[in-house]
Amino acid sequence: MINENYKLMLDDSSPGFYLISPLSLKNELRVLKKIQELCQKELSKYRTSLAEDEEIIKNDNLKLITLTNNLRNCIIMRMSEKKILTFYLKFAKYCEDLFDKTEKVKKFLNYFRKSSNRC
């Protein structure tokens, strides 16, 4: 049975979709590390950076260079791929930092509770 809070997040048009709880913080952190690793690996395969691609498109717009429609579309698609990979890379890092801070807060609160019980 799915928790009532989760039902609010589900779309009725996706039958069979259900949410599962995280296995552990350690497992979630390993997944986030793997996402970062895969995104970095894929980004490193490109010969140009996102900034360089943007410069190429800018120069084409200014008519400083002339790209064929096909080449221009390929560069725009490549830029989109890089933006998606960069988003997931930053998102995974953000979540990792958030989990780390959450864990530190939990440890602090546990320490504080134990210390206050001694008084």
Image: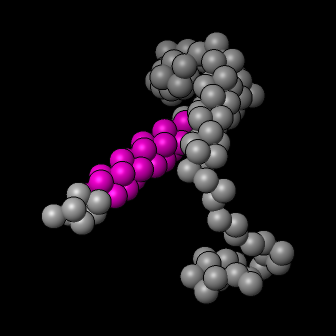
Residue placed farthest to the front in the image?
118
Q: What residue appears at the point 57 percent right and 82 percent down from the top-left corner?
A: 5
Q: Nearer the viewer, residue 79 or 13?
A: 13
Is residue 84 visible from the viewing direction of this image?
no
Q: Nearer the viewer, residue 46 or 52?
A: 46
- Who's the residue at 68% across and 25% down the image? 42
**Which region of the structure is painted magenta?**
87-112
Residue sitting at the far right:
16
Q: Magenta stretch: residue 76 in it?
A: no
Indicate the quadrant where residue 36 lies: top right
Here the colouring is one colour
- Residue 43: give x, y in percent of width and height: 63, 24
Q: In the rendered image, is residue 118 in sight?
A: yes
Figure label count: 0
The quarter of the picture where the N terminus appears is: bottom right
The answer to whether residue 99 is magenta is: yes
* Overall secondary structure of the magenta section: helix
Q: Image height check: is 118 above or below 38?
A: below
Q: Quadrant of the C terminus?
A: bottom left
**Residue 45 found in image quarter:** top right
Q: Residue 17's spot in the image, x, y percent?
A: 78, 72
Instruction: Please give the name of the residue rendered at 67% of the width and 77% of the height, measured from the top-left corner.
Output: 10
Query: Relative to residue 7, is residue 109 depicted above or below?
Result: above
Nearer to the camera, 104 or 72 = 104
The image shows residue 84 at horizontal and vertical percentages of 60, 40
* Residue at left offset 37%, top offset 56%: 106
Q: Position of residue 37 (x, y in %)?
A: 63, 28
User: Is 82 situated above or below 4?
Assistant: above
Q: Is residue 57 above or below residue 25?
A: above
